[in-house]
Amino acid sequence: MGGFGSGRRRRGKYTTSDMRALDVRRLHRDGLLTAGRSFNWQWSLNGEKIADINIRIEVDRVILNYRSRSHGGEWQPFEYPVFLEWTPCNLGGRRAWFLCPGQGCSRRVAILFGGSIFACRYCHKLAYQCQRETEDDRAMRRAEKIRRQLGWEAGIANPDGGKPDRMHWRTFRQLQAAHDAFAEASWRGLAKRLGLMGY
């Protein structure tokens, strides 16, 4: 399949973005959860395939079929069922969930993460990426979100843009003030980490 569980570990916990994610909502939205259907699902990076898995749909379960290796070892084949559960939506229709196949788990989850087996983030002991952010990283992410909202060029080191058409001046000034506060916090935190400016 292409290296589930074979990635390089950073300090601390792996995060959900370090792993291959299989989202049942996406499969359902794309109309793929029809009994009797079989297809390959793949992950890519910069347009190049890095991993794939065969998924076979049966009544109220999917069969996952792939190869995996750990720490550069031998490739091992895996094939096992993941059961589905369906719940009604408030406005009609129904929502699909995976029942985590991790040993003793069976949590109802939308996303499974690939390791030696596909399991929920609790079984893999995964943190969310934002849980590993420093305060200045978080401030930068929030400033960048505002820059996108305002249509400004990405990067807090770049000059600020103008007010978008059809945005009220009051809203613009509030967003600009929030952006400037987040950008300042990000620069201050970076300077402190680098031992600059007397921190």
Image (cartoon, helix red, strand yellow):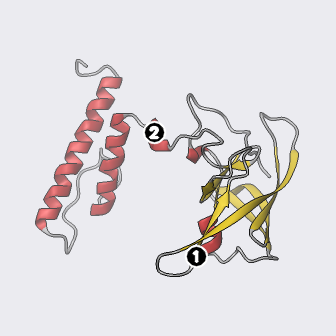
Number of the front mark, 2 or 1:
1
Query: In this figure, what is the number of numbered marks?
Result: 2
Dot 2, crowdedness within 10 Å: few (<14), some or many (≥20)?
Answer: few
In the rendered image, the vertical position of residue 159 relative to residue 38, given as above or below: above
- Residue 185: x, y in percent? 25, 37
SS class, disc 1? strand
Q: Amino acid at mark 2?
A: Gln
Q: In this rendering, would 189 be left or right of 60?
A: left
Quadrant of the rendered structure where residue 14 is? top right
- Residue 134: x, y in percent? 39, 34
Sooner in the amino-acid sequence: mark 2 or mark 1: 1
Identify the residue position indicated by label 1 in the image. 94
Q: In this rendering, would 181 be left or right of 26?
A: left
Q: Amino acid at mark 1?
A: Arg
The C terminus, quarter of image: top left
Dot 1, crowdedness within 10 Å: few (<14), some or many (≥20)?
Answer: few
Q: Are marks 2 and 1 in contact (CB under 8 Å)?
A: no
What residue is rendered at 46% in x and 36% in y? 132
Label ID, residue 175 = none
Q: In this rendering, would 28 be left or right of 169?
A: right
SS class, disc 2? helix
> 123 or 78, which is in the foreground?
123
Give the spatial CA distance, label 2 vs label 1: 32 Å
- Residue 59: x, y in percent? 78, 73
Instruction: Single out the residue that lies furthest toward the bottom.
Output: 92
Label ID, residue 131 = 2
> 47 or 122, which is in the foreground?
122
